[in-house]
Amino acid sequence: MSNFRGLLPAALTPMHPNGDIDLDTVATQAEYFKGVGAAGVFMNGTTAEWSSLTVDERKSLTKAWATQGGTELPVIAHVGHHCQRDAISLAEHAAECGVFGVSVIAPSYFIMETAQDIVDWCAPIAAAAGDLPFYYYDLPQLSGITIPAFDVISLAKEQISSFAGLKYSGTNLEGLQRCVGLGDYDVFWGSDENLLVGLSLGCKAGVGSTYNLALPHYLRLLNAFNSGDIESARRLQTVSLRMVDLMAPHGVIPSLKAAQGMTGFDVGECRLPFKSLSDDAASELIDGLSTLGIVES
């Protein structure tokens, strides 16, 4: 049940100076992603600041992305929410909008105790999206959920008819390898700075935040790996690590928003609790990225 090959940006949410969602810029983002070779887009996820958005805002973004993505840019909409009823509503709406698939992260306030608990939570949400491919979203560093993704998807593939794979953003490489070996499912590797590791372990697709800025760079890495030029792939991965190092002191998401103008368009700033970069910090970041040569305008 594998569908994806390639790299999908985890889309940033464009915002106006007053903090309102800037839906018009979604068209610009979509055209940019199409132009640089994105295999699709993952929206309303962590990079999109989903937990800082209202349900109505997330629905408006889903509609905008589905409209702008079309058949050229398949859209996977994250519909997870701490409230299952809201997640179901988001999934129903995503299906109505015509997205390619939906994804769900388990709630991280009242944390579930077993893999079966997570599947029981996800099943009605997946059903609300009809036959659309359903992807489990594993991000233990932020969710606090330590139940192995392999345990969850081993059950999900038997109990959720639309199950198609997962977005694996954890750091446990043994767990990643187990997921890849489970069968013919999509395993989206969610660690940009370790893309080469995921490819080496058998991942065919990736979802990443820094793909917003540097997708052509990562596609060169992917092509080098696929052609057997491992030395070039390693060199390209090292450059991406330096990019992440430049962003880390300020937070990756605020840094991405501050630097997005390097690609020819702006997406505004983040909402609280994120802090936007000062003018000096943003200038220093952009200078550093320019020196690396990793961002193409």
Image (cartoon, helix red, strand yellow):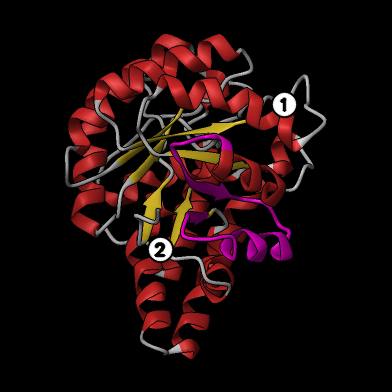
Relative to 297, is 231 above or below?
A: below
Give, as a three-letter code, the residue at label 1.
Ser
The reply to whether residue 271 is visible in this rendering is no
Relative to 130, is 234 above or below?
A: below
**Left of 81 or right of it: where is 224?**
left
Residue 22, percent from left and from top: 31, 21
- Viewer-side residue, 266 vs 22: 22
**Left of 236 or right of it: where is 8?**
left
Specify which label sits upstream in the sequence, 1 or 2.
1
Callout 2: SS: helix
Residue lying at 37% horizontally and 45% vertically, measured from the top left: 260
Give, as a three-letter code, the residue at label 2.
Ser
Please give the label number shown on residue 142: none
- Viewer-side residue, 225 vs 218: 225
Check disc 2 and report the residue beneath it: 290
> Which image quarter is the C terminus in?
bottom left
> Can residue 25 be found in the magenta stretch?
no
**Left of 128 or right of it: where is 243?**
right
Question: Splitting the image into 4 quarters, where does residue 275 fall?
Answer: top right
Residue lying at 55% horizontally and 26% vertically, measured from the top left: 123
Residue 272, percent from left and from top: 59, 21
**How crowded is the residue under tag 2: few (<14 C-alpha within 10 Å), some, or many (20+)?**
few
> Can residue 160 be found in the magenta stretch?
yes
Span highlighted in magenta in the image: 159-188
Residue 83, percent from left and from top: 61, 12
Residue lying at 31% horizontally and 48% vertically, measured from the top left: 40
Residue lying at 40% horizontally and 14% vertically, measured from the top left: 57
Check disc 1 and report the residue beneath it: 108
Of badges 1 and 2, nearer the viewer stands 1
Q: How many numbered marks appear? A: 2
Hey, which residue is sitting farthest right in the picture?
113
Residue 96, percent from left and from top: 27, 19
